[in-house]
Structure formats: structure tokens, C-alpha cells
Amino acid sequence: MAFRDYIDDAKTIFNRLFPDNQITDVIYEGPNIVVYTKNEDLFANRDDIAKQVAQEIRRRIAIRPDPSILESEEVAEKKVREIIPESAGLREVYFEPDTGEVVIELDEPSLINQRDMEYIKSIKNETKWAPRIVRAPPMHSHTVK
């Protein structure tokens, strides 16, 4: 099957499973098929839908927000700092505009566990960026940053 066929199949399946998907682009990126959408519900609840599509076409699916719906980095950082509790030890917030991810460095990432989706969903809904929680390095490094 050609790459174009996988992309067409993904669009067809998304249209069937989530008719109001507002997909703006579908591209092949390494082993993944990346779907960009303006629909906030599709982005926020992407895990279940991505699994269904991935099972049908037998390829990895990544759903990312369309760059046009992303909150500005300054506003998004302010909202992230408001959402994350002080006990987690927020150190840095980095933005990766190419993937629509916000990397959040914490001293205690176990407090914002991926299983406790409350903080993750809040960040997604408030900023439209996809949060990725990582442990802050023990020593500050410009190279790592």
C-alpha cells in the first residue's frame, strides 16, 4: 500500500468516526501518520479515536492541534503556571511549535501523573497545546535546554 493510500484511508475513517473533525492536514512523518485538526474535542479526546483509526489502518496515528488554534506561548505559559500546583516544583516550560507540544519540567512529575488526567486535560483545554511532563534535570544546563 502506498503512503498516499494510508493518508486517504485515515481521512475516510476519521470522517466516519468523527464527522465534524475539521482536519486541516494529514501527513506522513516517519512511522506515524500525523493528523492536524482545528476541532478541540478531537484533539482533547484523541487517544480513543487515534487507537480506533490505528487499528483499522495498522499504522501509528498522531493527532495534533492545527497551529492556528494554539494559544500564544506567553499566554499559554502563564496558564500552565496557574494550573500546575506549587508542590510539583515547576522549573521550566518549553514550547515545540512544530509538534504543538509544551514541555513542562517538574521536580516531582509523579504528582502530575499521566494517569491523573485532570491537569493534562486542563492544560489541553486552556492552551490547546499538548502537554508533555518531564522530570527536571538535577543541574541546569544550557545544552540540554
Image: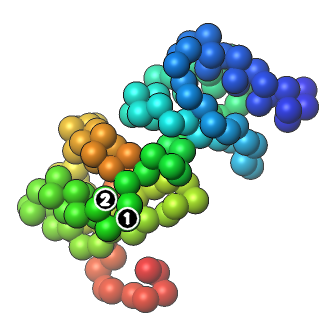
Badge number at residue 76:
2
Q: Is residue 76 left or right of residue 84?
A: right
Give the numbered dot on residue 73. Answer: 1
Residue drawn at the location 51% of the way across and 36% of the way down: 38
- Give me the residue at 16% from left, 67% from top: 89
Q: Residue at x 90, y 31 (%)?
A: 2
Measured along the vertical axis of the image, is residue 71 above or below residue 24? below
Circle 1/circle 2 CB separation < 8 Å: yes
x and y percentages locating residue 9 in the rendered image: 76, 21
Please identify the residue farthest to the top as the structure is shown: 16
Q: Amino acid at mark 1?
A: Glu
Residue 32 left/right relative to 129: right
Residue 34: image quadrant is top right
Q: Is residue 63 above or below residue 129?
A: above
Q: Is label 2 in a helix, a strand or a loop?
A: helix
Front-most of residues 130 and 143: 130
Image quadrant containing the C terminus: bottom left
Q: Nearer the viewer, residue 114 or 65?
A: 65
Specify the quadrant of the image occupied by residue 99: bottom right
**Residue that lies at the very extreme toward the right in this rendered image:** 2
- Find residue 20 and report its horizontal and vertical position in percent: 52, 19
